[in-house]
């Protein structure tokens, strides 16, 4: 992963492949915690702090499929606590929503097998037949949006990871799939 400065010079290069030769599949900047989330084909999502040191601070084991795309949402809860939500789309058509509590960045994986723990269990749901090609959050719709190679776009409640009513499924190009959406 190369991180560029606004003047288009390389600031840092992270060798994600050093972690057991895994291919990079997606990355996402998490504004609230100032972390870079990097998904790899080796069933893990690594987190790097804003100093972008060569080693990840922690990781998520993602053994249910290959994580292909990442989405992010920062929010402030009604009680004033800040919360982050990471959305992960995979190769079997599922989206998993991880609720990261306000002190998740204090966890550091010191050894192999010391993955990030969760207070609230992640919610995993099947939305597509095959690859999820993009997942993200649209503030104006207050919805998580997914698309996939099955030609569908879904509008979902990010907190429950469920479709929002019967008009929340849009069927488009079954033959070619939907590779991306933009709001």
Image: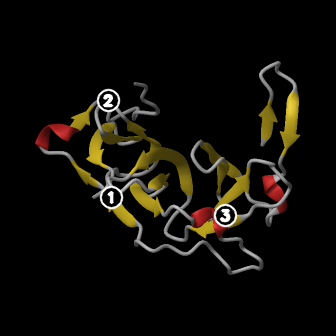
The residue lying toward the viewer, choosing from 63 and 86, is 86
- Marks 3/2: CA–CA distance: 34 Å
| Circle 3: element type | loop
Residue pictured at 31% horizontal, 55% vertical: 159
Residue 77 falls left or right of residue 108: left
Q: CA distance from mark 2 to mark 1?
A: 24 Å
Residue 42, label in figure: 3
Q: Residues within 10 Å of mark 2 (few under 14, many from 20)?
A: few
Determine the residue positioned at 51% across, 64% down.
65
The percent position of residue 83, horizontal first and vertical second, equals 46, 55
Q: Disc 3, disc 2: CB below 8 Å?
A: no
Image height of 23 relative to 13, above or below: below
Please give left or right for residue 14 compared with residue 72 in the image: right
Disc on the earlier residue, 2 or 1: 1
The residue under label 1 is 126
Residue 147 relative to residue 141: left or right: right
Q: Is residue 88 depicted above or below 11 in this figure?
A: below
The residue that disc 2 covers is 140
Residue 140: percent from the left, percent from the top?
Answer: 32, 29
At horizontal 25% and vertical 54% (from top left) the residue drawn is 162
> Which is more foreground, mark 2 or mark 1?
2
Q: Which mark is residue 33?
A: none
> What residue appears at the point 55 percent right and 67 percent down from the top-left corner?
62
Viewport quadrant of the N terminus: top right
The answer to the question of whether label 3 and label 1 lie on touching residues, with beta carbons closer than 8 A, is no
Name which of mark 3 and mark 1 comes first in the sequence.
Answer: 3
Query: Callout 1 environment at 10 Å: few (<14), some (14 to 19), or many (20+)?
Result: some
């Amino acid at each position: 992963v190369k991180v560029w400065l606004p003047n288009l010079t390389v600031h840092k290069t992270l060798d994600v492949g050093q972690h057991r030769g895994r291919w990079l599949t997606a990355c996402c900047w998490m504004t609230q915690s100032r972390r870079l989330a990097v998904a790899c084909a080796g069933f893990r999502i690594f987190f790097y702090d804003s100093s972008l040191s060569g080693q990840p601070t922690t990781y998520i084991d993602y053994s249910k499929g290959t994580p292909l795309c990442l989405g992010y949402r920062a929010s402030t809860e009604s009680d004033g606590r800040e919360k982050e939500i990471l959305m992960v789309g995979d190769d079997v058509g599922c989206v998993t929503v991880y609720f990261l509590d306000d002190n998740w960045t204090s966890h550091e994986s010191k050894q192999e097998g010391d993955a990030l723990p969760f207070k609230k269990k992640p919610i995993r749901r099947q939305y597509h037949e095959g690859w999820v090609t993009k997942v993200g959050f649209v503030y104006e719709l207050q919805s998580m949006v997914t698309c996939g190679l099955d030609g569908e776009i879904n509008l979902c409640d990010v907190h429950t990871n469920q479709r929002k009513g019967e008009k929340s499924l849009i069927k488009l190009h079954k033959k070619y799939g939907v590779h991306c959406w933009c709001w």
